Image: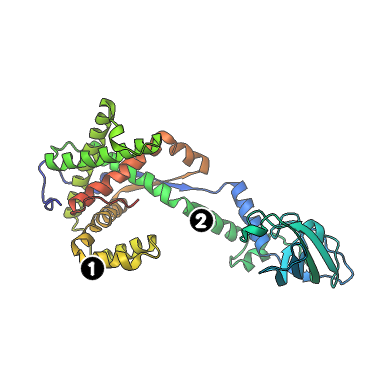
Amino acid sequence: GLAPVRKRPGIKKVDLSKIEIEKYEVKADKKDLETRLNQLAESSKKYNDNDASKAAANNDLVEFNYEATVDGKSFEGNKGEKLQIVLGKDLFIKGFDKQIIGVRKNDEKVVKINLPDNYPKKELAGKASEFKCKITNIKSPEEQKIDDAFAKNMGAKDLSDLKSMIEKQISKEFESITDQLCKKEILDQLDKQFKIDLPKGMLDSEIKTVEHTMVHEKMNEKGEKDHSKIKLDDNDKKEVKKISERRVKLALVLSNIGEEHSVKVSSQELQGELEKQLRMYPGQEKTIREYYQKNPSELTKLRGPIFEDKVMNLIKEKAKTKVKSITKEELQNIMSPSTDNKTKTNTKTVKKATAKKSGAKKTSKK
C-alpha cells in the first residue's frame, strides 16, 4: 500500500462549484406506461363465483382437485388439492387449459397430457399421463377499468398520481446506469483539468494491473486458457499506458479533494461495506467473516471504494447540475458500445486507483 498522499505538487485546489454536470433522468414513454398499468390491472384482477350452470371459458379461474397416473400407476407428487388456474395462461402444463374449457362446477374430467420435458423426476419427463380432475369452483374475472378508483386501490391519489409513481419507478430502474454516466462526466472533467507528474512506483504497479486485466479479457474473447499464449502488441501497450495514467491521476486528484474536504471513512462504514460483500456470497458468510477477523489489514482495503464514493457524492452535491430528461432509446445511444467500454474502464479506474491509495492491492468488486 502507498503512504497517504498529503499534498502532491501540481495538484491545485479544485473549485467544485465550477464543475458542471448533466444528470440524466430516463422518462417513461407512453408504451411503457401502458404496459405497466395493464400488468398491474392484470395482477390485481378480482374473480367472482360463477353461476353453477355456466361452462368455463378462457380467462376464467378454475379450481380443481386432481390425481394423476402414468401407465395407470400413481407416483410421488401426483395429487393436488384446490389448484387454481386461469384458463388461457397455460401456466400449469402446456396444453392443459384447452382441455378444461367447457367444464362446469362439480364435473369430473380426465385430461390426457404428456408430463413436461423438464419434469423433476427424470424417468417421468415427457411421459403420457392422465389427470383425473374434480372441478370444485369456477370464477369469472371482473372487468378491471384503469381509472381513479383502480389507482386508489393501488395506493395512489388518482390515476395521474399512479402514472407519475410508475414513471418514477421506471426512472429509478435506470439509476445505476445514469449514475455511471454522471460519474464518467465528472472524471472526464477532472482528467482535463490536471497535468500531474505521476509517481513512477504507482504508475508501474497500475500498468501491471491493467495489463493483467487486458490479458484476461483477450483470453476470454479467444477462449484461451493459457496466459503465455496472449501477447499484447504495441497498440495494446499504448492503450494500457493511457488507461493507467488516467487511473493514477484521477486517484491522486480524488484523494486530494477528499483530504481538502476532510472526507473520512468510519469503522461503521467499513463494517457496512463488509456486510454488503457478505450478502454477495450467500453461504460463505462465515468463512469470509473469519478471514477478515484473522487479517484485519484486509478490512482497511475496503476503505478505497467507500472513500471514492463519498468523494464522488461530495462533488455531485457541490457541482452545478442540469437535469436532462431522456428516453430509454436515447440512453441506449449514449451507452452505445464505444462509450460503454470507456465507462467500464473509467469507473474501474478510480476504484482501483483509490483502493491503491488506501492500501488495497485490488478491488475486484464491480
Circle 1: is it few (<14), some (14-19), or many (20+) Cα within 10 Å?
few
Q: Please state which of residues 44 and 78 is positioned toward the viewer in this rendering.
A: 78
Circle 2: is it few (<14), some (14-19), or many (20+) Cα within 10 Å?
some
* SS label for mark 2: helix
Evaluate if marks 2 and 1 touch, with contact meaning CB atoms under 8 Å apart. no
- The part of the image, by quadrant, that contains residue 282 is bottom left
Per the image, the residue denoted by label 1 is: 293
Q: Which mark is residue 325?
A: none
- Measuring from the top left, give residue 174's x and y in whole percent: 46, 50
- The part of the image, by quadrant, that contains residue 123 is bottom right
Three-letter amino acid code at the position of disc 2: Lys
- Measuring from the top left, give residue 16's x and y in whole percent: 25, 48
Task: Please tell me which of labels 2 and 1 falls first in the chain.
Answer: 2
Q: Is residue 276 left or right of residue 135?
A: left
State the colouring used for the structure image.
rainbow
Residue occupying the point 48% across, 40% down: 332
- Measuring from the top left, give residue 347's x and y in whole percent: 32, 45
**Labels 2, 1: front one:** 1
Residue 342 visible? The answer is no
Q: Please state which of residues 241 and 258 is positioned toward the viewer in this rendering.
A: 241
Q: Is residue 32 above or below residue 264?
A: above
* SS label for mark 1: helix
Three-letter amino acid code at the position of disc 1: Gln
- Measuring from the top left, give residue 269's x and y in whole percent: 27, 65
Q: Is residue 336 left or right of residue 8?
A: right
Q: Is residue 88 left or right of residue 326?
A: right
Residue occupying the point 76% across, 57% down: 113
Per the image, the residue denoted by label 2 is: 168
Give me the C-alpha separation between circle 2 and circle 1. Answer: 42 Å
